[in-house]
Image (tube, coloured by chain):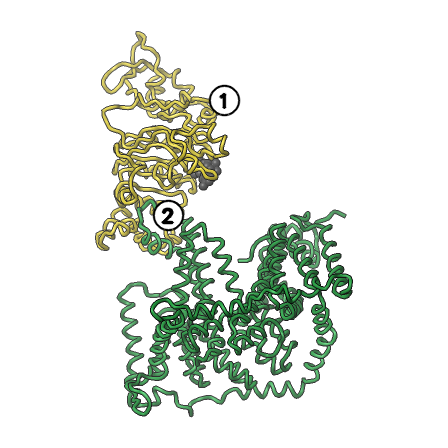
Amino acid sequence: MPHVSETDMPSALAPKLQVGELWKIYGTNAERLVGNLNRAPDDAFLEKHGLFGAVRGVNFDVMPGELITIMGLSGSGKSTLLRAVSRLIEPSYGTLLIDGQDFLGASSQELINIRRHRLGMVFQHYALLPHRTVLENVALPLEVRGEARTSRLEKARKTIDLVGLGNLIDRYPSQLSGGQQQRVGIARSLVTDPDIWFLDEPFSALDPLIRRELQQELLRLQKIVNKTILFVTHDFDEAVRLATRIIVMEAGRIVQIGTPEDIVMRPKNAYIEAFTRNIPKANVVTVGAIARPPTEEVLAGILPAQARIVEVASRILASSGTFGVETADGHRVGIIGTTDILPFLFSSPETHAA
Amino acid sequence: MMSTEPSAAGRWNGRTVILPVVLLLIVTLCANAGNILPHWLVVWPREAMLPLSTAIGNGLDRLARWHVFAGITVKDMTRALAGLIAWPANLLEEILVDGVSRGTGAAKAEVAPPLSWLGVSLATVWFGWRRGGVALAGLALLTALYLLGLGLWQSAMQTLALLGVAVPFGLALGFGAGVILWRQKRVQAPALLILDQLQTIPIFAYLVPLVGFFGLGSATAILATVIFTVPIMARTTVSGLTRAETAFGEVSDSMGCRFGQRLFLILVPAARQELLTGVNQVIMLSFSCTVLASLVGTAGLGYNILIALRQLNIGRGLEAGLGVTILAILLDRFCATRSVTRACGAGWLDLGIASLLLLVPTLIGFHETALTHFPDSWRLSSGSVVDNAVEWVNVNLFWLTDDIKAWLLIHVLMPLRDEMQTLSWSGVVLFLAFLGYCARGWRGMLLVAALATFPAAVGVWKPTMMTVYLCLISVAIATLIGLPVGIVAGKYPRWGRLILTTCDLLQTLPAFVYLIPVIMFFGSGDFSAFVAVVVFAMCPVIRFTALGIREVPLSLQEAGRQLGMTEGQMLRKVELPMAHSHILLGVNFAVNMALAMLVVTALIGTRDLGRETVNALSHVDPGQGLTAGLAVASLSLIANQIIGGFAGRQPQ
Ligand SMILES: Nc1ncnc2c1ncn2[C@@H]1O[C@H](COP(=O)(O)OP(=O)(O)OP(=O)(O)O)[C@@H](O)[C@H]1O
Ligand SMILES: [Mg+2]
């Protein structure tokens, strides 16, 4: 079984979203067969009936304010997982709790309400309605909710300002660039002020520069609106830059779940390692993770344990001395010096592959 | 030399090319040597004939007299329904043509005159300008001048009164059916297939039962038009909504839309383009029904065409025919263009101005009759130019038209017809079934065999073979002419635009209009039918060939050039093979259009299935009409199966 323990999460807070033993199975009569089963399906069951499991027994919890990225190769079931969690497609088996309340069992009326008020979604191909202007597109979810015209246009304007498109509100989607369209998509999903925000490869269709810009934008928005985010990508760079935790999927299962640093430092298998190989590790790894046991040396200074190597590298290199590493509450983790960080700074893909 | 031909794909390969030829030989042999085959395999035995025609007749009769409750029969109810349907049409007619009056007979007094021609024209032009700018306003003005100048205004308004009910009715019903089918995924495919097939039953065929239930008059005309237009609207609705749903279904779900919001807020606007083509089709088809509507006793432009056809008055016929076309185009443009003014305030202002333009001349019309009825003295002299031209051609070119006709009749048409008449039904069924197998495998074979047996089994074999003969020869000639024209249109964009626009125009003309010049030049009979069908069926061949040639990928063309191919080699080795499935689809459409046209040509004296349906109309024999109609539909289905199969996909 894949490792899905949640022991390293703070337990004081209640999870926003809990996913338990979630399956999505495709094939002829899949629904009926799973319905008759009365227990969690397994691989033998799939094989016996010639079914295909796009998502197979996935478990994870999401804490409020977390930004989780879902990663994996094409066809590994990322989109299916996201859609099953947001019930855009009905999961075949499993439990889904939002704020501890059963989401799978919600009636269609409750489902509509939850979607109108608490879930937002951004799509890879923007899916903006071509016959509506930017303003009307963004106001649409409010219109669906039955809000009065003036108030919904007002809110839509504010949200459009938030994504920095204030001067384009009367354009049609066809008159916008891809990046601008995706900002509209983001505004549209934010206008209802949802708790949980789903994004399916929102930046994949964009060129690297704009992608970078929108990633910054997303981080900025995350700071302002502080949502719980599930973000699908198959760009590891992007995942590392954005995520508080990363879920790595392979063939419908979660193979590893953890912080970016976890995944880079301790990849579960060769598949994940292949992913992480080209990542500049100094961007990901914190000094706390590579600190040596403390020795009696003269310290040039103290570094916070959660600082990334890139952030403090110049200080260490400039003084060429040894630094102490401490956690926020003053606990000494270890020490670190120039020789410790050099391999991470000058790691080229080839040397690490060796 | 290395072969550049693509490797033969599917079931169609060298071996199977020879087999149909062998089979054809066998069939002719069977036919000519009747003593080899037992007689019942040559002519379907009378004892085994399915009495479909009488069964339908009796069934409908019994249905009509069936008591629903307390002495009220189905027929009473349909007659009441007819009144209900006719009511808005009559109202429109009063407003547009007759004026509102009270009382009957001698006590009849006009309460209000009809809308003034000046008012209607001005309002139309104004709306045209607001919606489509100068172009649409110009078209509106042109239409008004044409109709007024040639004295067609009243007929045109009568047509509009009828279509003013039939088009919205057809649109609403088609859209509703489309939405239901779109939701019921399970019945969608078979239901659409049935709808498609319904559309190939000629409208004549169900005119008779409709008259039986709903009586002569506008109700029947409206219903026949609606039945004819519903399938196409339903189909475009289904495909438009399905496509919009794949693009926007998840968005609408993620926003928490209810069904109504999903449909009207998101999917319908997103499918707007496709739905508008549906609207366009419905308008065009409805206009093409106007002549048929006049057959059941309604007035309008269609009636003018019918009269012209009966009197062989080519000038008037063409005038009325063009009137139908120009009116259809105007209406279509009105529906298709997007409003320029989007703010709702401006919309109300436009409406106010338009109603002012409409009402002021009408109010003046209470006193000044010249404003309600266009004065005759203002009309242009009509038709004489055309008539003179025709006369000249008939006098001076008579030898030419007559020679062509005689030669083709003696050397091509008659021999073929005689040959077809002697074929044994079993041989034909076997042959078609074999083609069905080549095209679509076992299932295709069984379907084609069943369909081909149907006309023999219900006793319309002879007229069916007549239809097949006319259809075969006309489509063959249409393809011979259409293919090179289509190639030119595809290869040379400048010519292409001209040719394809002409095709568009020709296709909006009601089928009846084709008959008029043809009769003028060639008299009535098989040959005229043949010419009319060739002209009518040529357009799809040209259009699809041009499309196929144009869609040859640029990379392939460049590759060909780079290999040093000549134009001829390019055409033979690259373009035609690549366009082959498009061309076959064009031929398939041509067959369907030929079958539709052949029913119309029955009016000028062919002896095929069309004749049967037209006869049924005059004898009020619904069984005969429907049987012949079903035979036509089975022919078209056979063609779709075989040609569509070879083209590699179903025609839309
Ligand atoms: N409706 C469906 N019916 C059958 N199989 C499906 C269906 N939808 C998805 N699948 C299969 O489920 C698997 C996972 O698909 P999914 O779209 O989740 O992949 P993904 O990880 O998002 O890939 P990508 O990065 O290319 O978007 C794929 O193998 C796909 O073929
Ligand atoms: Mg995906």
Q: CA distance from mark 1 to mark 2?
A: 39 Å
Estimate how packed mark 2 is, as few (under 14), some (14 to 19) or many (20 or more) residues with alpha carbons within 10 Å. Answer: many
Of residues B629 and A125, the one nearer the viewer is B629
Of residues A119 and A315, the one nearer the viewer is A119
Please identify which colour was used for chain B in the image.
Answer: green
Q: Could you tell me if residue B39 is visible in this image?
A: yes
Amino acid on which disc 2 is placed: Gln
Q: Quadrant of residue A96?
A: top left
Judging by the rendered image, the residue that carries numbered circle 1 is A353
Q: Position of residue B585 (x, y in %)?
A: 59, 59
Judging by the rendered image, the residue that carries numbered circle 2 is A181
A4 left or right, relative to B465: left
Of residues B288 and B210, the one nearer the viewer is B210
User: Relative to B464, does residue A334 appear above or below in the rendering?
Assistant: above
B33 left or right, relative to B587: right
Q: Position of residue A71 (x, y in %)?
A: 41, 32
User: Relative to B113, does residue B178 appear above or below in the rendering?
Assistant: above
Q: Position of residue B512 (x, y in %)?
A: 54, 76
Q: Quadrant of residue A105?
A: top left
Most extreme residue toward the top, as rendered?
A: A296
SS category of the residue bearing label 1: helix
